[in-house]
Every structure is written in C-alpha cells, then in structure tokens.
Image: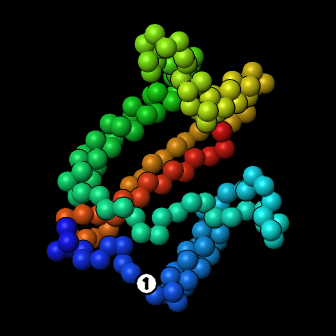
Amino acid sequence: MADILPSYPPSLDRKALDFLLTSLTDYCLSHGVTVRPQTPSKGNHLASHAPVTLFPSLFPRIAWEQAVKIQKTYNVLYARISNDVDWLGKIMDEYDVLKPGAHCRLVDVDDFVGRLWQLYKEVKKEGIVQVQHTREHRLTAGSITGFIPFRLYDSCGPF
C-alpha cells in the first residue's frame, strides 16, 4: 500500500486545506447536502452541510467488484423487505432478536430505528399520503490502482 499511496490522506498546507474546506462547504450547501441543526448556531443559521468525508477511506478493488456483482440482487432483497410491512413489523417488535433470552426488542436497542418505526406507525394510523418511498445506495469509484475511495450515498425522500 505504501508503494501505491506514499501519503494518504495527502498533507496540505493551511491555505490549501482552507480552500478545500470552503469549496466543499459551498458544494454541499448549493447541492442540498444539508441538515438542520438541533440548536441554533451563533449566526442563527437554519442549515449546515451534512457530514462529509474530505478524504474517503480506501476500499479494496476486489471487494468493490464483488459488491457490484451482487448489487441487483441486494436491491431486490432491500425493496422486498421494505415493502413487506407485516414482516418488517414482526422483526421490529419481536423480542430476543439480538440476544435470545434478553427480552429486548430491536426498536428498544436502536433509538433511531425505534423512533423511525414509531413515526411510521403513527403516520400509517393517520393515513399515508406518500405513495412511493425510494431509497438508493450508490457506491462511487475512484481510479487508484488496487484500491478505490469508497463513498456511500444515501438519498431517501421524506419518510
């Protein structure tokens, strides 16, 4: 690895790093890569850029190629799971999913998933207006021989 990339991530002087950070922030804000802060910032900004990686982690090319080979099958599996609400509900509310005998539910172990599932059930009770929910995971490749930068983009509409 040291032969391929003697310095990764690259060392940047302060001026170059500041330029890169400013450019990345501008790109994020102008392309909708934003989040709303939970508490107002000093300047009372309503949004800031979502977490991004300046220098992506290296990812072995062979693993990338394997992921590409199974992507269509994974997409079908993902779509079937997300559209089978009855089955998904059993998994979310089932006890002992993670630790047999622990008497805990998945929604109790993962706060984010628990809140998301509760929100889904509330919206379903009121009547779901959104007809279709799409979620896309897209892997993008770089061009370094033997390794590629790995980024996972998660773009999903309002839930």
72 or 87: nearer the viewer: 87
In the displayed structure, 16 sits above or below 100; it is below
Left or right of residue 9, residue 125 in this image:
right
Residue found farthest to the top: 101
What x and y, as percent, mark residue 9? 36, 73
Residue found farthest to the right: 44
Left or right of residue 20, residue 8 in this image:
left
* Identity of the residue drawn at 43% across and 84% down: 12
Label 1 neighbour load within 10 Å: few <14, some 14-19, many 20+ = few
Left or right of residue 91, residue 128 in this image:
right
In the displayed structure, 55 sits above or below 18; it is above
Residue 142, by quadrant, is bottom left
The answer to whether residue 52 shows anywhere in this view is yes
What x and y, as percent, mark residue 143? 27, 70
* Identity of the residue drawn at 80% across and 60% down: 40
In the displayed structure, 143 sits above or below 122; it is below
Per the image, the residue denoted by label 1 is 12
Residue found farthest to the left: 3
The answer to whether residue 131 shows anywhere in this view is no
The kind of residue tagged 1 is: Leu
The color scheme shown is rainbow
Question: If the image is split into quadrants, where does the C terminus sit?
Answer: top right
Number of residue marks: 1
Circle 1 SS class: loop
* Identity of the residue drawn at 78% across and 24% down: 126
What x and y, as percent, mark residue 104? 54, 17
What x and y, as percent, mark residue 101? 46, 10
Residue 49, by quadrant, is bottom right
* Identity of the residue drawn at 60% across and 24% down: 108
46 or 73: nearer the viewer: 46
Question: If the image is split into quadrants, where does the N terminus sit?
Answer: bottom left
